[in-house]
Image (cartoon, rainbow, N blue to C red):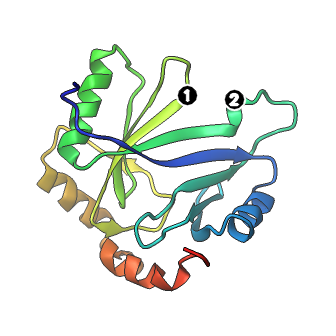
Amino acid sequence: MSSQPATTISHIGLHCFDRDNMVDFYTRVIGLVETDRGGPNDLVFLSGDPERDHHQMGLAPGREVGQDAGPFLNQIAFRVDSLSTLRARADAVAKEGITDVRQTSHGNAWSIYFPDPEGNIIEVFTDSPFYVRQPCRDALDLSKSDEEILRETEALHGNDPEFEPFDNWKAKMAGKTPVGA
């Protein structure tokens, strides 16, 4: 039996030939809801349960005809329950000898990114208590205490008019729950 805490799959990211067509398909046919959009990569975030998950799918433009199948998968993301567990995962990755690890604060989550043995990008993250408009990428230093990370995140985004406790944002999203959910 593993001594590692349970981990859950959270979301996937796809590179798309026609991102807007994919957004239309996943919202109209699958019933996902658009929760955010923008940034330099023009990402669109979708969720089937926006009261619980900011996004379960991220769609990015840029996939080109003729590319191998692999580049369509942007990442596989796993949710963990705390910064402590995130640090444990970062330690496990380091013990594997993986050196290409990025620590990132998204404001609404704190993440590590690294390649698996075949080069697929893995994200392991824990939720923050805040809503921060996405996409957002700030530096993260997991050697800092939970309290320091929390304070830094709030200091970076607290003046943004859209910044709020995640529970408030979830309440606003309650009216956007997909039909049939």
Query: What is the CA distance from the residue labelled 1 to the residue labelled 2?
Result: 8 Å
The reply, left or right, for residue 119 in relation to residue 148 is right
Q: Say above or below: 132 vs 120.
A: below
Q: Which mark is residue 120?
A: 1
Image marks 1 and 2: residues in contact by CB distance under 8 Å: yes
When asked about the image quadrant of residue 153, the answer is bottom left
Q: Secondary structure at mark 2?
A: helix
Locate the C terminus and report the quarter of the image it occupies: bottom right
From the image, tell me which residue sits under label 2.
Answer: 70
Q: Residue at x 43, y 63 (%)?
A: 53
Identify residue type, mark 1: Asn
Answer with mark 1 or mark 2, whichever residue precedes in sequence. 2
Q: Which mark is residue 1?
A: none
Residue nearest the viewer, comparing 114 with 56:
56
Q: Say above or below: 71 vs 126.
A: above
Task: Estimate the x, y position of residue 151 in percent, counting from the top left.
Answer: 18, 61
Task: Estimate the x, y position of residue 90 in percent, counting from the top left.
Answer: 28, 31
